[in-house]
Image: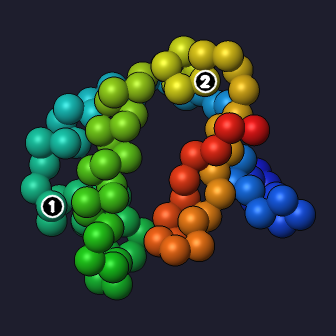
Amino acid sequence: MLDIYDTNMSLLRIGPFNYRPMRGVDLWLSQSDEFILQHLSTSPEVEPPGFVDDAKATLKFIQQHPFPGVTIFPDNRPRYYRKDDLTGQWVPICY
């Protein structure tokens, strides 16, 4: 497990990381929501409503960035995020 949250600075630190291109991602994205739920979840009966949308967004990200070391982390540096107090969303920061 990676420790990605710095409790002292309240920052989320992601990467850099790399993975092999995922063959068949187009095929996964063409499947029905029910198929994705049944095959990508370890507990499809109790997943929250946004599970399939999140899974598809992840697959699209992998599709768009087959080599994240080149497209996401071109300078081999991590990305940092801080939680916005008003919206609760993680927002990128320069660090």
At horizontal 52% and vertical 74% (from top left) the residue drawn is 86
Q: Which mark is residue 33?
A: 1
Residue 7 position, x and y percent, is: 84, 66
Residue sticking out furthest to the front: 86
The residue that appears at 37% across and 65% down in the rendered structure is 41
- Tell me the quadrant of the picture where the N terminus can be found: bottom right
- Position of residue 12 in the picture relative to residue 74 (left or right): right
Q: Residue at x 26, y 77 (%)?
A: 49
As shown in the figure, which amino acid type bears the numbered disc 1?
Answer: Asp
- What colour scheme has been applied to the protein in the rendered image? rainbow
Q: Specify the quadrant of the image occupied by residue 63.
A: top left
Instruction: Answer yes or no: is residue 83 visible.
Output: yes
- Under circle 1, the secondary element is helix
Q: Quadrant of residue 69?
A: top right
* Identity of the residue furthest to the bottom in this view: 46
In front of the other: 43 or 86 = 86
Find numbered disc 2 in the image and state the secondary structure of the residue it sits on.
Answer: loop
Q: Nearer the viewer, residue 5 or 84?
A: 84
Q: Quadrant of the C terminus?
A: top right
Which badge, 1 or 2, comes first in the chain's sequence?
1
Please name which of the two marks, 1 or 2, marks the residue nearer to the observer.
Answer: 2
- Horizontal relation, residue 21 to residue 34: left or right: right
Residue 67 percent across, percent down from the top left:
49, 19
Q: Is residue 59 left or right of residue 92?
A: left
For disc 2, the marked residue is 73
What's the distance in space between the residues labelled 1 and 2, CA to CA? Answer: 31 Å
